[in-house]
Image: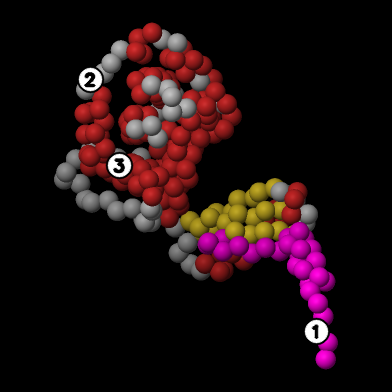
Amino acid sequence: MAMSGRFGSKLSLISKVLQTDALVTQRPAALQQTSEVLRNYATATGTKEAKVRVPLALFGGSGNYASALYIAAAKANAVEKVEAELLDLADASARSPMFSQFTQDLSVPRDTRLKAIEAITADAKFSDITKNFLSVLAHNGRLRHIDTITKRFVELTMAHKGEVSAIVTTVIPLPADEEKQLKETLQEIIGQGKKVKLTQKIDPNILGGLVVEFSQKVFDMSIRTRTRQMERFLRDPIDTL
């Protein structure tokens, strides 16, 4: 993403923030302010708007956070923008060991986490919704779950757009014509009204063939699995009459 380079180049802000003496200053109103954000996050855009419902029921802590963010983003008509910003943040975390360690380290003081996130998101010019949401995560010590929350948020945006995720794993990338044929086959399975979003994944360990993960099902047609099945067959005793 275009934003990734800019965002990645600013991760040094974390080091600066961590070294700032002013971070030890207490913020007595921080807990109260964040509690208000948590209670009113999904309705912060006003009370006269039509009620927004999540297109998919998610469960667990990460699902709750993702759902609250989706509702707030939908009310502000900023779902795609928020999704892009979350994906950019996840990408930056994957590319930067320093940032990843920062999000995982629970020993970092709360004020330090807040200052760092506020500086990074401001410099990356994130939307107010994303900035506020990340501040909530920083305050609650949930930044370490940002990757999972991002994945759950993407599930919501895909459900909203009628997209169905399919992952095909092969030893080498599928040729364009085979990828198209596989996508058309999956599209026929799900029928009209939804769209297949196909993602290729490379894994030499499957030895050959392919594995398709689709609609909570796994179609394993890899050479590795066929070999294991053959080994089990050969090891089983042969019934004799």
Query: Distance of mark 3 from mark 1, alpha carbons?
Result: 64 Å
Residue at 38% from the left image edge and 53% from the top image edge:
59
Q: Secondary structure at mark 1?
A: loop
Q: Quadrant of residue 214?
A: bottom right
- Along the polypeptide, which appears first: circle 3 or circle 1? 3
- Which residue is situated farthest in the top direction here? 21
Judging from the image, the colouring scheme is secondary structure
Which residue occupies the extreme bottom position in the image? Answer: 241
* Residue extent of the magenta highlight: 214-241
For mark 3, what is the residue? 72
Queried whether the magenta region covers residue 67, the answer comes back as: no
| In the image, residue 216 lies in the stretch drawn in magenta | yes
Q: Position of residue 90 (x, y in %)?
A: 51, 35
Q: Secondary structure at mark 2?
A: loop
Task: Decide: few, some or many residues near mark 3? Use Cα within 10 Å; few <14, some 14-19, many ≥20.
Answer: many
User: Which mark's residue is nearer the viewer, 3 or 1?
Assistant: 1
Numbered circle sitting on residue 42: none
Identify the residue under disc 2: 28
Q: Is residue 118 above or below residue 58?
A: above
Q: Is residue 130 visible?
A: no
Q: Amino acid at mark 2?
A: Pro
Residue type at tag 1: Asp
Counting residues from the start of the chain, the first of labels 2 and 1 encountered is 2
User: Few, some or many C-alpha atoms within 10 Å of disc 2 (few <14, some 14-19, many ≥20)?
Assistant: few
In the picture, the quarter occupied by the N terminus is top right
Residue 239's disc number: 1
At x 73%, y 62%, the residue is 225
Which of 162 and 170 lies nearest the eye of the viewer? 170
